[in-house]
Image: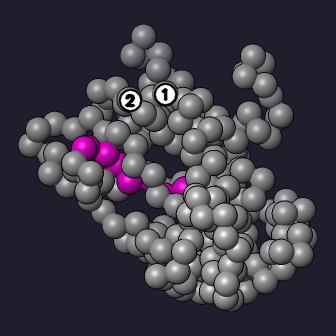
Amino acid sequence: CSRHVKTVVRAVIIVVPLLIRDPELIRNKDRLNNPKFKPFGGAVGALDGSHIPAVIGVQDQKPFRNRKGWLSQNVLAVCDFTGLFTYILCGWEGCAHDGRVLDDAIEKGLWALPGFYFLGDAGYALTQACLVPYRGVRYHLKEWGRSGEKPTNYKELFNLRHASLRNIIERVFGVLKMRFPILVRMHAFSFDMQKDLVMCCFAFHNFIKLNEMTEDEF
């Protein structure tokens, strides 16, 4: 069984570049044509880090222990506003800061064109490639839901619109982890194999969405 899993993973990794590709601007237009999001016309997607459980030998565990105390790899994911992943970077230790992982992704060729950018949360720095919310201002959608209030100034309005757009990455992470339980409970493969398994799950998600398949068909 283990040999077959490795064979399938190696095969899927070969086609990952066909399934996880740079964003297509046309796919985002329906969402961004909404007048509420006109100021975000240069956005091509949202990015965030997700901690995926990792099984690590005792002698190598320290850098993989995240701030919540459990072992993980910090995976950077970027998706467009239709819910398709356009970039994945696996393998960073759980203790790595999201901003450092993003810097590494940019160095490794994360898609970037002048005038276009991704939406990130306050864990990232404001750069030409990443637009983040105002700090110290109400941001997350659940905060607005609890209060039932409307924005009282331009910063709150900006953060509300920003959160509404960027929320796609959180929703897609939720779908992904429900669809592939191994992303919640990793098995004791080599770490390289664990990275490849994570990449395969993201690729399968795109395959299902691109082919508009149901769970039964998949």
Q: As drawn, is 153 to the left or to the right of 36? A: left
Q: Where is residue 27 in the image (x, y as percent from the top left)?
A: 85, 59
Residue plotted at (27% across, 35% down): 55
User: Does residue 157 appear in this view?
Assistant: yes
Q: As displayed, is residue 85 above or below residue 36?
A: above
Q: Which of 19 and 64 is in front in this view?
A: 64
| Element marked by disc 2 | loop
- Name the residue tied to disc 2: 185
Mark number, residue 181: 1
In the rendered image, the vertical position of residue 91 relative to residue 8, given as above or below: below
Image quadrant of residue 14? top right
Q: Give the range drawn in magenta.
A: 70-78
Asked if residue 114 shows in the view, the reply is: no
Quadrant position of the C terminus in the picture: top right
Residue 44 in which image quadrant: bottom right
User: Do the residues bearing badges 2 and 1 touch, measured as CB atoms within 8 Å?
Assistant: yes
| Image vertical order of residue 90 relative to residue 191, above or below | below
Asked if the stretch drawn in magenta spans residue 23, the answer is: no
- The image shows residue 52 at horizontal and vertical percentages of 40, 43
